[in-house]
Image (cartoon, grey):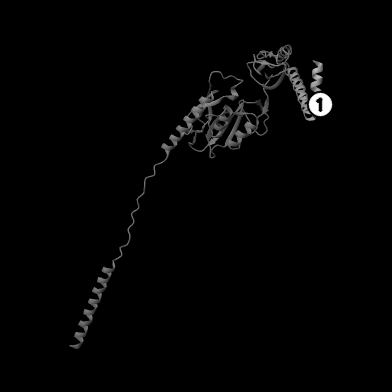
Amino acid sequence: MLEQLKKYWAKVSEHPFLKHLFIIVCVLLVLGVATHLLLLLGTRHSAHRTVPDLTGIPLEEALGEARRQGLEIIVNDSLYVPAYDGGVVLDQLPEKGVGVKPGRTVYVTINSYRQKMVTVPYVAGRSLRQAKNMLEVAGLGIEQIVYRPDLATNYVLEEYADGKRISEKSRVQLEAGSGVTLYVGESGSVSTLVPKTVGLHLQQAKSRLWELGLNIGKISFDEGINLLNQREARVYLQTPSAGSRARLGAKVDLKLTLDAAKVTAQSAAADKKSCAASTLKRPIRWPVFVWTVWPTVPSKRSRSSTTGFSRTKRQRKTNFSNNAHVR
């Protein structure tokens, strides 16, 4: 066998092109086999771990369970949910039951030990829009907008937080996400157009309503929405509907869902209803008829007859005068 290989090699060596081609093919085969073996060693196709359920347990226990499964844990976010103790795992990615390779990182969200405290900014003396923007930048919201008679509409008169009036020197702190009460001026009985909030997340819908002087009414969530996925829910129904008019300070009820198809359908229906309402409210413009009296211009025939009659009359007068002079 070995002698036959030597004979074949001797024959191949007589042709330099075939010799080099054979060497290249052998090198490529060796490299391919080596790469395949290295990938098998690196990816470890036969080795896998099942991600355990880490939610609802303290972070220390979650770390111990992950080590036993050959996994790592990284805390990538934190929320404050009063119903859970501080440090409890609220969410994880990948979810429980997923098969992964050893050493895979599991990202978890834990419950904060306490809510972040922020200083309430002084917004009295500003427009409602400016006050709303300042509060949102500080991490706060509006609990209620109360209108009072005043010369300037949508002008913030007073600001209260936790029942205390806020002044320029106040240093009151509230939990992030809390709301303040604003007393705003209103000149007479003023109404506003209800904006469309269908398709918006809850915080976006609140911001749009506050900006127009409307309060947040009842907030309802579909089944399956909890404190963890609440941020992803969007409004699919609002009362009063978009395009209608409401008194300043009126409340708007919102319903939210995670169903994208429901949001799309309700958004199209809201647009159609708003368009129909605007068409009905559009004033009817009746056509105006203008009667114009043009001055009558006599025709050439009438002018010529009139001129001829005048000449005949003048000629008769002249003839009568000459006859009288002769007599």
Q: In the displayed orientation, state which residue is furthest to the left.
A: 327
Tell me the residue that label 1 is attached to: 13
Which quadrant, please, contains the N terminus?
top right
Helix, strand or loop under label 1: helix
In x, y percent, where is residue 134? 63, 34
Q: In the displayed orientation, state which residue is furthest to the bottom.
A: 326
- Above or below for 259 versus 52: below
Badge 1 crowding class, 10 Å Cα cut-off, few under 14, some 14 to 19, many 20 or more, is: some
- Above or below for 11 versus 70: below
Is 253 positioned to the left or the right of 140 in the image?
Answer: left
Residue 241 visible in the snapshot: no
Is 97 positioned to the left or the right of 39 in the image?
Answer: left
In x, y percent, where is residue 187? 51, 38
Question: Which residue type does callout 1 highlight?
Answer: Ser
Pick whichever, 65 or 88, lies toward us. Answer: 65
Answer with the quarter of the image where residue 231 lies: top right
Looking at the image, which residue is at 80% across and 24% down? 11
Which quadrant, please, contains the C terminus?
bottom left
Answer with the quarter of the image where residue 283 lies: top left
Looking at the image, which residue is at 78% across and 30% down? 17
Disc tally is 1
In x, y percent, where is residue 77? 68, 22
